[in-house]
């Protein structure tokens, strides 16, 4: 799959399923095809988060790694301090609210309010803790950008082309919608990996991203 997508994908995400099955050797194999987003979503006490982040930062090809913002300010700050000022360090992302959640499911786990308000609160906390960016749905991108300013990475999962099904996602957007909202990176899995031709699906998404970036640039030029 990585060989098929090498010229189309900016980097490859290794999540908990692949890492549990293959461990660090998965990174050794995939790093030759591009950078790695190590998506293990660490969520523990600050000391444990710090140790996990420090170990992850030493793995092959890791450009991004993440932890849950619900680990709190102390957990996120511990992750930042664990990375320190090492040269060519990976960027740390804080996962806000999973795109599988809606207001009803959040209420069932004791979080009051709409997903958007919870996401914004966690994004502000992540910014204060010093992480490099957050993972959030496209629906919250504009509000996060207004609240956190430039230079804060906005990584958007839950991407579903118009022709794709939602599967277990709730707060979704098309690639074009996410880019026009201001996303810096898109995380796209099953619409590509589950397609009859992953390369063709990826190429179509790349074309849609390119068009949306051009539109975003035109709007920025007009406002300037």
Image (spheres, grey):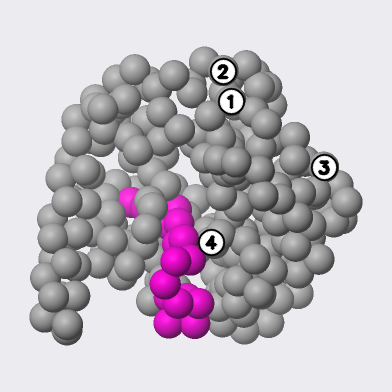
**Which residue: 68% across, 22% down?**
23
Is 193 located above or below residue 40 in the figure?
A: above
Among the two numbered marks 4 and 2 on one chain, the one whose residue lies closer to the N terminus: 2
Residue at mark 1 to residue at mark 4: CA–CA distance: 21 Å
Question: Where does the C terminus fall, quadrant-wise?
Answer: bottom left
Q: Which residue is mark 3?
A: 51
Is 149 located above or below residue 180 in the figure?
A: below
Q: Which residue is mark 4?
A: 133
Question: How busy is the neighbourhood of tag 4: few (under 14 within 10 Å), some, or many (20 plus)?
Answer: many
Contact, mark 3 vs mark 2 (Cβ under 8 Å): no
Contact, mark 4 vs mark 3 (Cβ under 8 Å): no
**Which residue: 45% across, 33% down?**
35
Contact, mark 4 vs mark 2 (Cβ under 8 Å): no
Among the two numbered marks 3 and 2 on one chain, the one whose residue lies closer to the N terminus: 2
Residue at mark 1 to residue at mark 3: CA–CA distance: 17 Å
| Image spot of residue 20 (x, y percent) | 69, 26
| Image spot of residue 61 (x, y percent) | 53, 29
**Which residue: 60% across, 71% down?**
127
Check if residue 131 falls in the magenta segment.
no
Residue at mark 1 to residue at mark 2: CA–CA distance: 6 Å
Disc 2 element: helix
Contact, mark 1 vs mark 3 (Cβ under 8 Å): no
Is 126 located above or below residue 209 in the figure?
A: below
Among the two numbered marks 1 and 3 on one chain, the one whose residue lies closer to the N terminus: 3
Q: Which residue is mark 2?
A: 28
Contact, mark 1 vs mark 2 (Cβ under 8 Å): yes
């Amino acid at each position: 799959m990585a060989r098929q997508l090498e010229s189309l994908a900016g980097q490859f995400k290794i999540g908990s399923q692949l890492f549990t099955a293959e461990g660090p050797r998965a990174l050794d194999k995939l790093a030759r095809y591009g950078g790695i987003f190590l998506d293990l979503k660490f969520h523990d006490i600050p000391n444990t988060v710090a140790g996990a982040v420090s170990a992850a930062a030493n793995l092959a090809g890791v450009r991004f790694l993440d932890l849950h913002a619900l680990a709190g300010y102390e957990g996120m700050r511990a992750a930042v301090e664990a990375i320190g000022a090492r040269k060519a360090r990976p960027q740390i992302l804080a996962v806000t609210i999973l795109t599988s959640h809606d207001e009803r499911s959040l209420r069932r786990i004791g979080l009051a309010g709409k997903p958007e308000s919870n996401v914004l609160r966690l994004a502000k906390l992540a910014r204060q803790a010093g992480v490099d960016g957050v993972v959030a749905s496209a629906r919250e991108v504009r509000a996060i950008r207004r609240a956190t300013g430039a230079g804060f990475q906005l990584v958007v999962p839950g991407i579903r082309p118009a022709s794709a099904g939602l599967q277990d996602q709730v707060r979704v957007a098309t690639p074009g919608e996410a880019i026009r909202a201001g996303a810096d990176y898109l995380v796209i899995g099953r619409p590509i990996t589950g397609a009859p031709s992953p390369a063709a699906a990826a190429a179509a998404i790349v074309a849609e991203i390119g068009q949306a970036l051009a539109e975003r640039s035109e709007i920025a030029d007009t406002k300037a």
